[in-house]
Structure formats: structure tokens, C-alpha cells
Image (tube, helix red, strand yellow):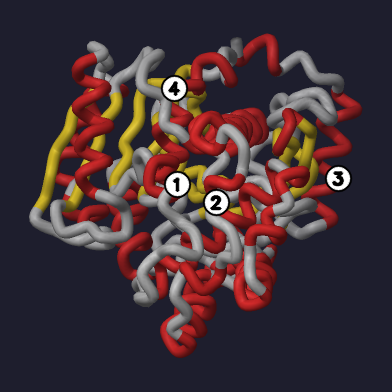
Amino acid sequence: MRISRMAATSKLAMTALAATVTMGVLPAAVAHAQPAGLPGSVVGVEPLSAAATLPGSVRAERLLYRSTTVGDQPTTTSAAVYFPPGEAPEGGWPVIAWAHGTVGLGDDCAYSVAGPGAVERDWAYLGTWLKQGYAIVAADYAGLGGPGEHPYLNGIVEAHNVVDAVRAATDRHADLSNKWAVVGQSQGGGAAVFTARYATEFGPDLDYRGAVGTGVPAYIEDVLQLIGPGMPPIALSSHLSAYVLYILNGLRTTFPDLDIEGLLTDSGRTWLDRAQTTCIGPLGDELAEAKPSIGSMFARPLTSIPNLHALLSNYMGLPESGYDRPLFLGQGLQDTDVVTPETLRFAAVLQANNQPVTLRTYPTDHNDTVNASLPDSLPFVTNLFA
């Protein structure tokens, strides 16, 4: 399939080369490219900021590429690409697609712009994959660092973005293999699961091998039905409140006819607009200081939306079948950022449905599970590429 993708015209290749030279980044090779405008076609290349450059990577760049957003509409988004040291093996570096956790909704929150929010955690994790001889393609999701709004937790959009990032990177660099796996944490854990379900369908020209998801938010659609003015007037953790606001923004972006603002109080609308542009760290700090309860943000319950559960399930509900490659789920038993019993229920449903899932649990919280899972997930992924 890679040969067919090399059939792009020399004019297109020279245009891509000229663009990258103009921006001061020379490609390893411009051997082939997606036709302009199609998902996975390269739009441009930029240098990464120091904050977004993985320590230990010998080459790194910010890749701009075409992908898909809400309603299957075309968009341009971005990804960070990191290369390990040394000479690429025969067939090219195998690729790990990194699906990152929640960073926020504003353009300046994008992973390829500001880097990870949890710097020590993510750099340790990605650095381990890099040392194992994997190149890393870290997709920004649609609306982060590019046009439009980010439809937070829209799994189908995230899966398109991850697959198209791998396609763009492997098309641009001849020393990247088209063999790839996806790993993700938190929001990215859900994105990795959606990618696992649709990778073959969305990227038949690539050689998808399997997935790892940690801290996966499962059955959030069930929990959201409880939200409304009748909730007890207690403040949730600042991150949980931020997640709710990000989800509301995602629903507003995906379903503009729902009139999300009409469900909210003046305070809720103020926080909703604040969340639309504020990254997770600053927003969490503001919420921790103000301590608003979720109930105080709502004038009407979320269940005022007709057919709410079906709508949410189609939007963020993790697929319960249809996986054609192995899937690893790692869950911390002290994780309170996601609803841990629901994540364990999701794994049990997959097992009951005879899906190729492996579950491992750890005596850790949301953040610590990422690296705690490596003794299990590293050999799991090694076997995928064997």
C-alpha cells in the first residue's frame, strides 16, 4: 500500500520540499505524499517549541495535516513527531501514536505547542518508548492548535485525527514504517480505544497492530445524566469540574442546536466560556479558588435534552465490539479522575463480548498508572510488532 501512496506527482513533492525549506525544517525524505486536501495530506511543517520537544529525540517537528472534525467535515490539525537516536532499522522505525490526555480547549493548549501538562510523567513515558526504538507521532485533536473548536471526547473525531497523523508522518518520512500502534492516557486513553476500534477502517493503507489505553474514561454518558441543579452543593475536585465544563463545550461544538447555554445559570455560562479558551492547569487553579458546585452552574438538568443517553452514547460511548487487534487496558485502583468501577465494567463487557482485550490493574492513582503500566504494556506492544 505504501507503493501506491508514492504515486503523488513530483510537483507536489517539490512543493512540499519548498514549503519545509522555507519554514527552516528539512525532511528526512519527501518520497511520497497524500494528494493535497485528502485526510493525512501534509499541509506544512514547523519547528517545535522547546516545551513540546521530547528530551532524547534526535529529530522533532510539528506537522500540519488534513483530517476530519465534527460531521465528517475536513479540517487542518497538527502533530508532534519525534525520532529516536540511531539509524532506522530495515523497513523504517515502527511508530507509536501517542494520544494525549486533557490539556484544555484553547489553541495555545495544544500538545505540539505547549507540550504536555504533566511534563515529568509524559516525558518519562514517551522517553521509554523512544529508547525502545519507536518513533512517536503525537496528534493534536481537531480544534487544538488549528481552526475551529475542539469537540472534547468526540471519539470518532479523535480516531480520525490519530490515524491521519500517522498517515501524514509516514507519508512524509521514508524512514518511518507504516507499522504502528496507539497508546493513550485519560482523554487519550479513550481516544486510543476509539482508534483501536476504527484504525483498520480509517487507515487501510497503514499496518495497524494494536493499542494501549490507561486511565480510560468509560461510561461517562451514564454519569452525566445525574448532572443538574439538584446535585448536592458540594465542590468536586477542580479537575473533575474542568472535565464537566470541557464536555459541555464539546457538546456545544458537536451539537450546536442543543442550546447548552440555555441549561445553565449565569455562573455556568461564565465558566463554560472560560473553559473554552483556558488550559487545564490554569482552569483547575481558578476552579479550586472559586469552588463553584456543579449544581450551581445549572438552571435545568442535562436530562432536559431529548434522548440524552442515546446522544451521549453516540458521542463518547466506547465501542463494546468490533476490535480486530489486541487492546491493553491499564487501570489504577485509586484513580478518581475517571470512574474506576465503570472502566473495569467496560473491560468486563469487552471480555464477555470475546474482544481481544487484556486488563491489568495497579495500586495507583490516575497519573501514576501511566508509567506503572510499562512493565506490562512494553512487552505487550513488542509482541504486536513481532
Of the residues under marks 2 and 1, which one precedes in the sequence? 1
Helix, strand, or loop for circle 3? helix
Residue 109 appears in which quarter of the rendering? bottom right
- Marks 3 and 4, how far apart at CA: 37 Å
- Marks 4 and 2, how far apart at CA: 29 Å
Q: Residue at x 54, y 51 (%)?
A: 302
| Relative image position of residue 146 (x, y in whole percent) | 74, 54
Circle 1: residue type = Gln
Of the residues under marks 4 and 2, which one precedes in the sequence? 4
User: Is residue 33 visible in the rendered structure shown here?
Assistant: yes
Residue bearing mark 2: 302
Residue bearing mark 4: 197
Circle 2: residue type = Leu
- Marks 1 and 3, how far apart at CA: 52 Å
Quadrant occupied by the N terminus: top right
Q: Which mark is residue 18?
A: 3
Q: Residue at x 28, y 43 (%)?
A: 132
- Which is more foreground, mark 4 or mark 2? 2
- At label 2, counting other C-alpha atoms closer than 10 Å, the crowd grade (few under 14, some 14-19, many 20 or more) is some
- At label 1, counting other C-alpha atoms closer than 10 Å, the crowd grade (few under 14, some 14-19, many 20 or more) is some
Q: Residue at x 57, y 40 (%)?
A: 154
Q: Which mark is residue 225?
A: 1
Helix, strand, or loop for circle 1? loop
